[in-house]
Image (cartoon, rainbow, N blue to C red):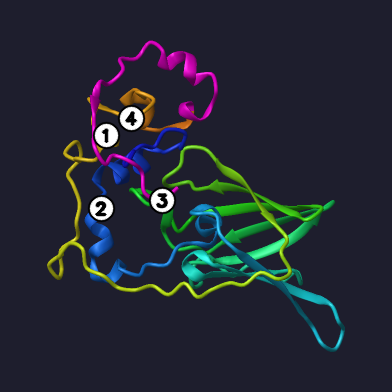
Amino acid sequence: MTGDAAGVPLSAAGRWLADSWSPANFDTAEWVCRPHAWDYSLEGPLSQMRIWTEVEQATQKLLAYHGHINQEEQETTIWMDGRPRPPAYALHTWSGFATGEWDGNVLVVTTTHLKETYIRRSGLMVSDRTVVRTRWKRIGDYLQATVIIYDPVYLAVPYIRTTMMWVSDPGMRMDPYPCEEATETAVPRGKVPHFLPGKSPLPGLDPEARDRFATPVEARLGGPETMYPEYIAKMRAFRRPTRSVTGATEFGP
């Protein structure tokens, strides 16, 4: 359901941002072909990925792993040569600055210097102070990734996004994924679409709107408590919404 933040440990600032977000943001000229961060593209939606190495010719030492994912054509470089992390004021990009180190047979990647970007494409964001740790593990022909997001601005506690799996396919063909501009809603130049706090029409924020599980609105507001299984028992005491809403599904992960 669009606007549903259940399971996401939003801080007060993250909740305020989600409450003010408008779907018309996607039709703002500057954001029509807005890229997605690498960690978002891993999950939303799960798609083909290619990984290759960069080796120093003179020494044959591994310098970096490079990755390209089909969804939104996002790319990453994971530096493996021990280079220092740039200062906080250095350039922030959609892929950020990533370094990797081995923890046994698990590649642990730490990414900083990311632009503000999506957790979900419905107002749930992470800030440019975010640190993303991704744990990559190969299990036979399968590659597993677990992403943990640390954001002191929009998240109250670290957020484990999910565990994702790919199967090795040496003959894989990856088609282009170009962004084609299309205007669905005319947004006047200079206008920033938004809603005032408490005025959002998103169904996930409507106490009376019912999803297929009849999730109480208290849970849909998110927060650290909603991440844990114990919260299910607490939800039983909340009032369940009853009004069905047409077209209230979430878009994006």
> Counting residues from the N terminus, which is met first, the one under dot 2 or under dot 3?
2
- 206 w.r.t. 21: above or below: above
Residue 83 image position (x, y, % from top left):
71, 72
> Counting residues from the N terminus, which is met first, the one under dot 4 or under dot 2?
2
Mark 1 and mark 3: Cα distance apart in space: 17 Å
The amino acid pointed to by label 4 is Asp
> Counting residues from the N terminus, which is met first, the one under dot 4 or under dot 1?
1
Residue 144 image position (x, y, % from top left):
70, 50
The residue indicated by pointer 1 is 205
Q: Quadrant of the N terminus?
A: top left
Mark 1 and mark 2: Cα distance apart in space: 14 Å
State which region is magenta.
225-253
* Residue at image location 34% in from the left, 22% down from the top: 216
The amino acid pointed to by label 2 is Pro
- 116 w.r.t. 197: above or below: below
What label does residue 86 carry, if any? none
Few, some or many C-alpha atoms within 10 Å of disc 3 (few <14, some 14-19, many ≥20)? Answer: some
Tell me whether the residue at label 4 lies in contact with that at label 2, contact meaning CB atoms closer than 8 angstroms: no
What label does residue 211 carry, if any? 4
Q: Main secondary structure of the magenta part?
A: loop
Few, some or many C-alpha atoms within 10 Å of disc 2 (few <14, some 14-19, many ≥20)? Answer: some
Which is nearer the eye, 30 or 247?
247
What label does residue 252 carry, if any? 3
The residue indicated by pointer 2 is 23
The amino acid pointed to by label 3 is Gly
**Closer to us: mark 4 or mark 2?**
4
Residue 246 image position (x, y, % from top left):
24, 37
Mark 4 and mark 3: Cα distance apart in space: 16 Å
